[in-house]
Image (spheres, rainbow, N blue to C red):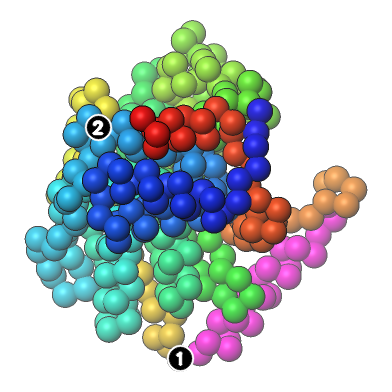
Amino acid sequence: MTRTIRSEEMHSVLFSLFKKHGFSKEKAKLLAEVHTENTLYGVNSHGINRVPFFIEQLQRGLVKKDAEAEKVEGFGSLERWDGNLGSGVINAVKCTNHAIAMAKENGMGLVALRNTNHWMRAGYYGWMAAEQNCIGILFTNTEPNMPAWGGKEARLGNNPLVIAIPRKKGPIVLDTAMTQFSFGKINEYQLRGEQLPYDGGFDADGNLTKNPEDILTTKSGLPIGYWKGSALSMVLDMLATLLSAGRSTYKLGMEEHEYGVSQIFLCMDAATFQDGELEEQLLEEIISYTKDITPTQPGGKTYYPGEKSLANKIENEKNGMQVSEEIWNRVIHLLNN
């Protein structure tokens, strides 16, 4: 069951919740803003649904409420930062802003971050970059939740990847995990008591399944593109680990809970070549060509990455957000107890 929540109400409740758990007014406001914004974009799985998980991580001591990311090494436009096990959201916002600032100064900036925590909806930081007229390429590693192609046990992470491109009519923002469905999305289907629309992972016998409970139990998601997604996941983990000198998916899997992940924030200033009109023209050519197509279903259409997310935000701002009754009740309970 769901209920309708306005963004103002959600932000107010979450702000109070994060303040109650010891965050400063400034940090509580930022956390409430990010979780609310993620839900507005229709990504409940990494918005409101993740709040109880975040509070649990905080109570276990895996997230340090007073810690923040800080620079430890610099090599021109390439820097290493340590997240000090602070909030993944607060650290990611800080590192994205710094990568943007480096890009504005040098054309490009890369922050490699270690010892941080779950950044919730990865696309949030892509939108941040695009709204500052920067191209953004961002990714993170995760605990093992996907088998390498040809194997049964989970050895790879679903390692979300974001590619964001600024555009006057609305940014292009690809936000994709290396699994066919993110585990947050699989949790959404479980909450609704629904099967996945396509095979999303493997059951205990190694068979492909649409049953979310089976996949959540085995922690074995299906790689996108089968062996291709498996390979891409491994390479993203390698890059995040090497550039940050942080922990790999292998090391993350040695812990009972996921924490201390490694992330990359790469931003490029789109104004560097001073040909903005040409850039817009080229983007419109690609989008128009892709949309000028015979739909597979009557009345159907194709979308560029980020188009549906923006439509979700507009709709949810107007009519309110549909939120799981169970999740909302858990959030209210955390606030009042």
Q: Is residue 6 magenta?
A: no
* Front residue of this view, candidates 315 and 303: 315
Magenta highlight range: 275-295
User: In the rendering, at what x and y percent does residue 320 appear?
Assistant: 66, 51
On the picture, is 67 further left or further right than 304? left
* Local secondary structure at mark 1: loop
Task: In the rendered view, tell whether residue 26 sits above or below residue 286.
Answer: above
Q: Can residue 150 be seen in this snapshot? A: no
On the picture, is 66 further left or further right than 317? left
Q: Quadrant of the C terminus?
A: top left
For the residue carrying disc 2, how many other residues have a C-alpha within 10 Å: few (<14), some (14-19), or many (20+)?
few
Q: Residue furthest top?
A: 205
* Local secondary structure at mark 2: helix
Q: Residue furthest right?
A: 298
On the picture, is 61 further left or further right than 156? left
Task: In the rendered view, tell whether residue 25 sits above or below residue 14.
Answer: below
Residue found at x 54% / y 56% = 8
User: In the rendering, at what x and y percent does residue 225 appear?
Assistant: 54, 38
Q: Quadrant of residue 125?
A: bottom left
Q: Which amino acid does the dot numbered 2 rest on?
A: Gln
Q: Main secondary structure of the magenta part?
A: helix
Q: Residue furthest bottom?
A: 274
Q: Can residue 98 be seen in this snapshot? A: yes
On the picture, is 101 further left or further right than 184? left
Q: Which amino acid does the dot numbered 1 rest on?
A: Gln
Residue found at x 40% / y 34% = 336
